[in-house]
Amino acid sequence: MLEEKENISGQNTRPKLKASVSTFGFFSLAFGSMIGVGWVTALGGWLQSAGPVGAVLAFLLGGLLMICIGLCYAEVTPMLPVAGGEVAYSYKSFGVGESFGVGWFLAFGYLSVSAFEAISVSKVLGYLFPNQIPSIPIYSIGGESVDLVHLVLALGFTALITYVNYTGSKGAVNLQTYLTLALLAISIVFISFGFYEGKLSNLQPYFGQVDDLSISAGVLAVAITVPFWFVGFDTIPQSAEEANSDIAPKMLGTLIVAAIGGAIIFYALIILSASMVQPWETLLGKELATAAAFEGAFGSTFWAKMVLVAALIGLMTSWNGFFLAGSRVLFALGRGRILSPALGKTHPKYGSPSNAVLISGIFTGLACLLGRQAMTAFVNVGSLCIVIAFLGVSFSFLRLRIKYPNFYRPVRLKWGWLIGIISIIGSIFILGVMIIPASPSSLSSMEWIIFVIVAATGLLFWFMSASSRAGTSKEERDYLILEKYAKEAPQD
C-alpha cells in the first residue's frame, strides 16, 4: 500500500513512499553522489596548492571531519528513518521554523548541483567527442554564450533523470547501482595501471607551494574544499524511508560511514596514481589533469577516453543522487504541511513523490537556461547552503540527546558529545572560510546577492504557506513528519 489509511483527527492521511531501496542501492546513492567529476576537473588545482602527498593529506584531514559529521548522521538516521532526513531531525529537535530553514537551504543546495551537472554533461561529451558536437550560440549571459546543442542535451538528460525518478525510487536506484558499478570497474583499471606503470620518483616534490603560501597553508587550501567534494553521503538520510524491509535501521548508519570511507580511498588513489605516471608538475595548468596524465604517460588517447567515460558516469551518478535527495526534501516539507501539501503527494502507481520530482525537474531545466558561468555561482551558494544544513544536523544531534535521552537509538555513538562538538566546530570553520571576505574561498558579491534572493524567496514561500501550517495541529504534524517515531520510545 502506498498510503497508510490511519489518520489523525480525520483530516490528514500520511503519504508513504514505496520501500524498494537495497543495501548496495543506498551505498551507490551515497558513493556515486560524492564522486562526480571533480577528480578530473580539479586535480590540477589540488596539485598546484598542495602537491600529491599534500593533497592526499588534505583529503584525509577533510575526510576525518566528514566522518565526524557522518557519524552524527549515523546516529540520527536510524533513529528517525523518514524521508527528508534533516527536515525531520531539525523538526524533532527545534520545531517548524528551524525545520523549514534547514530544508529550504538543503533543497536549494541539492538542486543547484543537479542543474550544474545538467549543464556539465554536454561539456564532458564535448571532450569525449571533440569536433563532433556543433556550436550554435543563441544568447549570452555574463559574457558566456549559451549554445543550442548543449542546451538541448542538458534539457534532454534532465527529462531523462526526471522520468526515471518520477517512475519510482527503484528505477532511480537501479540506475545508480549500475552506473556506480561501471564507474568502479573502469576506475580500478586505470588506477591499477597507474600504480603498476608509475614511479614513486614522479611524486617529488611531495608538497606544492603557491606564491608565498607555506606547505601547511597549501594543504589547508585543499582541505577546506573537501566537504564540497564529499557532499552526497547525506542522500541516504533523504531516502531512508524507502529502505527494503530486510534492511536493519542500524545498517543505514553503517552505510553512511562506509560511503565516506570509500570516497576518501577513491580520491587518494586517484591523486597518487595520476601523479605517479608522469612528473606531476607537468599536469599543472591542464584543464583535465587526470585525463592528461594517463594520455601523456601511455601515449594513447584511449586512456584519456577511459578517464572521461568514468567522469561522465560519475557526473550521472552525482546528478541522479542529488536530484533524488532534493525531491525528497521538498516532499518532506510538503507532507509535513510546512510548505504546500501538494509537494507531499505520492504517485498512486509508482509510490514516488511525483509533484516534488516534477518541481525538481522544472527547476533543473530552467536553471540550464542560465549557462555554465551563472550556475557556477549557484553551486557555490548551494555549497554554503549544504554546510548550513550540516551545521543544523550537528546541533540537532546534540539537541536530541538532551531532549530525548531515552529515545530508541539503533546506533548510539561512544564519545558522541565530542563528535558532535567537533562537527559543529568544523562546520562553523568551513562557513567562516566561505563568508569571511578576506578568505580566498569567500563568496563573491554576486554570490551573496544570490544567497539573499534564495533566503528572501524562502521567506516568501514561508508566508505563502502560513494557512497550511495554521490548519495543521502539532499532533498531526508530528505524525505526518515522524510517523511512529513521534513517540518518546518507539519499538524496534
Image: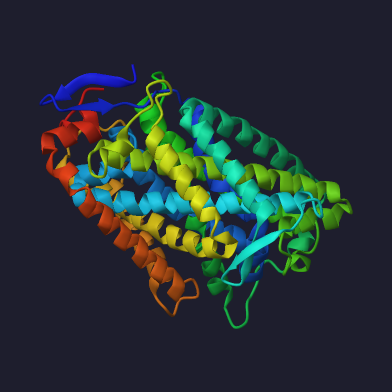
User: Residue 249's x, y, as percent?
Assistant: 35, 28
Quarter assignment of residue 54: bottom right
Q: Is residue 206 left or right of residue 105?
A: right
Closest to the observer, 204 or 341? 341
Asked whether residue 176 is in view, the answer is: yes
Asked whether residue 234 is in view, the answer is: no
Quarter assignment of residue 436: bottom left
Closest to the observer, 150 or 378? 150
> In which quadrant will I find the C terminus?
top left
Q: Is residue 299 left or right of residue 372?
A: right
> In which quadrant will I find the N terminus?
top left
Closest to the observer, 316 or 227? 316
Q: In the rendered view, how is the structure colored?
A: rainbow
Quarter assignment of residue 179: top right
User: Residue 127's x, y, as percent?
Assistant: 75, 53
User: Residue 277's x, y, as percent?
Assistant: 80, 55
User: Residue 300's x, y, as percent?
Assistant: 88, 51
Q: Is residue 391 above or below residue 207?
A: above
Q: Residue at x 40, y 33 (%)?
A: 354
Q: Residue at x 42, y 78 (%)?
A: 437
Q: Residue at x 16, y 30 (%)?
A: 487
| Number of on-image labels | 0
